[in-house]
Amino acid sequence: MKTHQYEALIVGAGGAGLMAALYATKGGAKVAVISKLYPTRSHTGTAQGGIGAALGNLEEDSPLWHAYDTVKGGDYLADQNAVKVLTEEAIDAVIELEHMGLPFDRTDDGKISQRRFGGHTSNFGKAPVRRAAHAADRTGHMILQTLYQQCIKHNVTFFDEFHVVDLIRNGDTVVGVIALELGTGELHIFHSKATLFATGGWGRVWSVTSNAHSLTGDGAAVVYRRNVPLQDLEFYQIHPTGIYKMGILITEGVRGEGGVLINGRGERFMEKYAPNIKDLASRDVVSRSIYLEIRDGNGIKGKDYVYLDVTPATVNRYLAEAGETRRITEEDVEKKLPDILEFCRVYLGVDPVKEPMPIQPTAHYAMGGIPTNVDGEAVSDENWTVIPGLYAAGECACVSCHGANRLGTNSLVDLIVFGRRGGKAIAEYVKKADFVPLPASPEKEVTAEFERIRSSQGKTRPGELRQIMQKTMMADVGVFREEKGMKAALETLRELKHRYNTDIHIDDKGQKFNTDLVEAWELGCLLDLAELTTISALNRTESRGGHSREDYPKRDDENWLVHSLLTKPASEEVYAKGAQNPIVNCDKKVDMSLAEQDERFKPKVRTY
Ligand SMILES: Cc1cc2nc3c(=O)[nH]c(=O)nc-3n(C[C@H](O)[C@H](O)[C@H](O)COP(=O)(O)OP(=O)(O)OC[C@H]3O[C@@H](n4cnc5c(N)ncnc54)[C@H](O)[C@@H]3O)c2cc1C
């Protein structure tokens, strides 16, 4: 077995991983990035709409307003100290990207252009503000390419198509990872002083999702199995606008450019649910509104979708009604949303400059994940005990700067701001820390698990289990939830896990490029995350942000202004009998200084 030694390992080469790798390297650490995908295929590359920063290039803006929106959009669960870091450092981070060479769209006078996005306002909710810096509707693509080029320039070492499948710990300390080399099927041991997970989300838990096939939550599952708790998993964002039946994302930028949602009666229904901010209300609110319309029989032709209309005729009519002087033309739409137009023309045969797009909500973003502080250090409990050697950043981490619901454009900022902080912290840490020895045969368990999957002779293909899991989660642990449905879902998921462990088979028994094997292993991660999401969602008896319970429709600040931390049951045997995972409801020490600064941050009744 090959063993490699690096001071710092970065698992994942999306925006968060590349930014962390760049800063750890610049800080003098010997760094390797391990990625199951070729880096520029990471999901960050699909981000469309923009990156939020209060640059104030087109109209007045401030980081405090951005912070207010983020806290409010997150339904007051976000840690306000983390939000403060996010919104203040966003400005400098975006300018840094520009200096690295990112080709942002420009205003006429040469500044970075900005557009509106859901939930982003000026003056504490008074009016929508142009805060999302963008490069057409390919912002993430540009970020990923820019950062990858910078990493190459700074000689970062990459292990591409290496799949991390286990975390190695010696006592409490994290001392590295085990990775499967896809091309050869061999396992490699990576020994490190510091390891940062930036493995992205797990949208593939649900049947309709905007997420790439690779988003199977490996990082979160791998660390959880090695006794790292996961935070706030009940908060999973369902984005309002995915292409009907396919889930492919239609960016909120469409509504930012003036697009409106229309129901089967031809009504702009968001006027009912969010009279002030209408179609640009936060995502949880818009997704629920679409579901309610569909449930009331107001879907298009009574079916389970509505229209998103960005045709100039419709947009200009509503702009005129609102007393705005701005008008849009077909050319504007072509220029600002080229990828969206192409998706719709290719996949749907619909031309969005002439007709509305059929859309339905789509599973999109994990607010929860590996708990960290603002320096990317992973923590093991509500007392902020740092796990030596373990870091996380990006979507797989929970800082928590998004609370119960993330605002659009705030993930890209999160990657850059907290990826950078994680990278800097690692560079400092490895200067002082020694290599802690590897335990004996750390690969034993994972070798056995891969052998089990490869040689199992069961009746079920992994794909069958995946489909049942995805449908179950969409129906019972999706936009709306209630106890009965979730309990049934939990039972189904446990049954699926049992079948996964005892009754699967795969066709490819080979070593090289065995994607059959890897996909089966990924399903194990998805099943873990589906189960843990359901447990967390059952536990939280209130509605907040992305977690909406029909049996507890109100937000309950008295009892639930807390994060949940889910830890692995002490014994696998107890687990097999279906015992509850221990959940700690913790006030992950919210720093209220920002709140004190401004009374308006205090939790209050929802005012949408
Ligand atoms: C379609 C779409 C559009 C979006 N638009 C926007 C937007 O406009 N603005 C915004 O702010 N946010 C947007 N988001 C959200 C945002 O893009 C993501 O949250 C963010 O890019 C995640 O970045 P990341 O660095 O955490 O992980 P990712 O970019 O998802 O990268 C994950 C990395 O981890 C690696 N990896 C995973 N598992 C393993 C493993 N087991 N071993 C080794 N490597 C592994 C992968 O190879 C990959 O390199 C969008 C998301 C989607 C899906």
Image: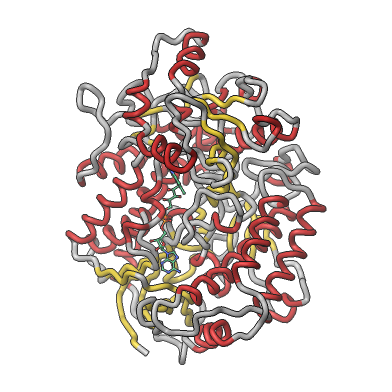
The residue lying furthest to the bottom in this view is 440
Q: Quadrant of the N terminus?
A: bottom left
Task: Decide: is 491 above or below 411.
Answer: below
Q: Quadrant of ligand 1?
A: bottom left
* Residue at the spot 33% in from the left edge and 70% down from the top edge: 8
Q: Farthest residue toward the left?
A: 153
Examine the rendered structure and indicate whether residue 538 appears above or below residue 550: below
Image coordinates of residue 296 in percent, x first then y, are: 75, 30
Q: How is this picture coloured? A: secondary structure
Work out whether residue 540 can be spotted: yes
Instruction: Indicate the quadrant containing the C terminus: top left, top right, bottom left or bottom right.
Output: top right
Q: Looking at this view, is 258 or 400 the one in front?
A: 258
Where does the image place residue 240, in percent across and percent down from the top left? 57, 37
- Residues 160 and 371: in front is 160
Q: Residue at x 44, y 77 (%)?
A: 514
Q: Is 486 left, or right, of 64 in this rendering?
A: right
